[in-house]
Image (cartoon, rainbow, N blue to C red):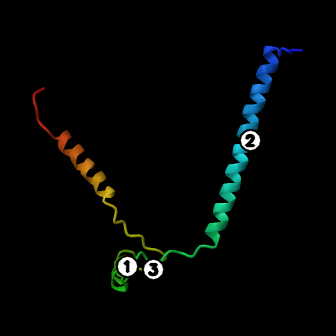
Amino acid sequence: MTTHLSPGMVALVAFGLVFASLGCLAILLFVLRALSVRSLKGARAPEQGGLDPDTLAVIAAAAYATLGAPIRIHRVHAHADEADESWGQAGRMDIMVSHQVGPK
């Protein structure tokens, strides 16, 4: 015996499956987020980026001279990524191109 589903019933089943899948995905994401937050709470704060105490003293002195009040350095992050330089090169290139004089 074959049963034929009406188009409305097929659409209802399809939408039900899609929303059930989305609900399962949302639950999975919430669980993964809760696990990552829990693991980060137990992690220690990173070290001072491998900077020597003299460099930290210079940074603190510069901040004190600028602000005129004692400061406390909580974290220092030194960027040593070569990709950061590419943004500067792109900016300089934009400026040079905008100042070019050519035939109009």
Which of marks 2 and 1 precedes in the sequence? Answer: 2
Number of residues whose C-alpha sits closer than 10 Å to that of mark 3, classed few (under 14), some (14–19) or many (20 or more): few
The disc, 3 or 2, on the residue closer to the chain's N-terminal end is: 2
Give the residue number, with chain letter if any, for mark 1.
Answer: 51
- Label 3: state its secondary structure: loop
Q: Amino acid at mark 1?
A: Leu
**Viewer-nearest residue: 92 or 46:** 46
**SS of the residue under disc 1:** loop
Residue at the spot 21% in from the left edge and 46% down from the top edge: 93
As measured in the structure, the alpha-carbon distance from the residue carrying label 1 to the one carrying label 2 is 47 Å
Whether 100 is drawn above or below 88: the answer is above
Q: 57 or 28, which lies in front?
A: 28
Badge 2 crowding class, 10 Å Cα cut-off, few under 14, some 14 to 19, many 20 or more, is: few
Per the image, the residue denoted by label 3 is: 71
- How far apart are the alpha carbons under marks 3 and 2? 48 Å
The percent position of residue 97, horizontal first and vertical second, equals: 19, 40
What is the x, y in percent for residue 28? 70, 50
Q: Quadrant of the N terminus?
A: top right
Compared across the picture, whether 67 is left or right of 15 comes to left
Q: Quadrant of the C terminus?
A: top left
7 or 2: nearer the eye? 2
Return the disc, 3 or 1, that comes first in the chain's sequence.
1
How far across and down, in percent of the image, does residue 37 sit? 65, 63
Instruction: Give the label on residue 39, or none.
Output: none
* Residue, disc 2: 23
Disc 2 is placed on an element classified as helix
Based on the displayed image, in which of its 4 quarters is residue 52 positioned? Answer: bottom left
Which of discs 3 and 2 lies nearer the camera? The answer is 2
